[in-house]
Amino acid sequence: MAGESGESSPLMGALTHYSREREAAAVRARKQLGVNELDAKALSFVGEHPGVRPSELAGYLGVTSAGVTTMVERLVRRGILRREADETDRRVNHIHLDVDLAKEPWSQLARFDDTCRRIIRNLDPQLEADLAALLLQTTMAASEQAERVDGVATDAASAA
């Protein structure tokens, strides 16, 4: 496994392999369903926040209100999302899923993660806690380092 990713650390190789396989599974699922990455992210958010307003969805996705309107309209036409008018203010729409993400074919979007969850549930609780702590500590340290580098690059660009 370590050799496949070019890593000398078996753990780093395994993490790299996991990341690549997770992304590949997501790409395959989106391709089969005919949705892009932003669509899939929107579907997940709407599933977690039924009745979300378009402005909230746009904020979460980091797109303009026009961009989210176009996306929602396309997904409504495909029967994936539906809009419902607010009962007290007809100018306001709420967005809902019109598909069940837990059922086929939509469950493909979460299949890789669901499989990993089932495997993790069978781990020794202490081993799971130790692995989680290691991954969180490593991720936080790497993120902090990247932010420092990004900050230095931003400062240098601003000074130029």
Image (spheres, grey):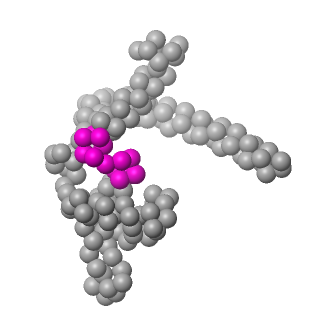
Q: Residue at x 48, y 33 (%)?
A: 135
Q: Is residue 130 left or right of residue 46?
A: right
Q: Position of residue 144 (x, y in %)?
A: 63, 41
As displayed, is residue 117 above or below residue 88? above
Frontmost residue, 125 versus 116 = 116
Frontmost residue, 141 versus 153 = 153
Q: Residue at x 77, y 47 (%)?
A: 157
Q: Main secondary structure of the magenta part?
A: helix
Instruction: Report if residue 39 lies within the magenta region.
Output: yes
Q: Position of residue 44 (x, y in %)?
A: 33, 54
As displayed, is residue 3 above or below residue 25? above
Look at the image and tell me whether residue 116 can be seen: yes
Q: Residue at x 23, y 59 (%)?
A: 78
Residue located farthest toward the bottom when viewing the structure as drawn: 88
Instruction: Report if residue 113 lies within the magenta region.
Output: no
Q: Position of residue 134 (x, y in %)?
A: 49, 31
Can you say which quadrant of the picture contains the N terminus?
top left
Q: Residue at x 38, y 35 (%)?
A: 23
Q: Quadrant of residue 137?
A: top right
Q: Quadrant of residue 28?
A: top left
Tell me which segment is drawn in magenta: 29-41
Look at the image and tell me whether residue 148 can be seen: no
Q: Position of residue 43 (x, y in %)?
A: 31, 55
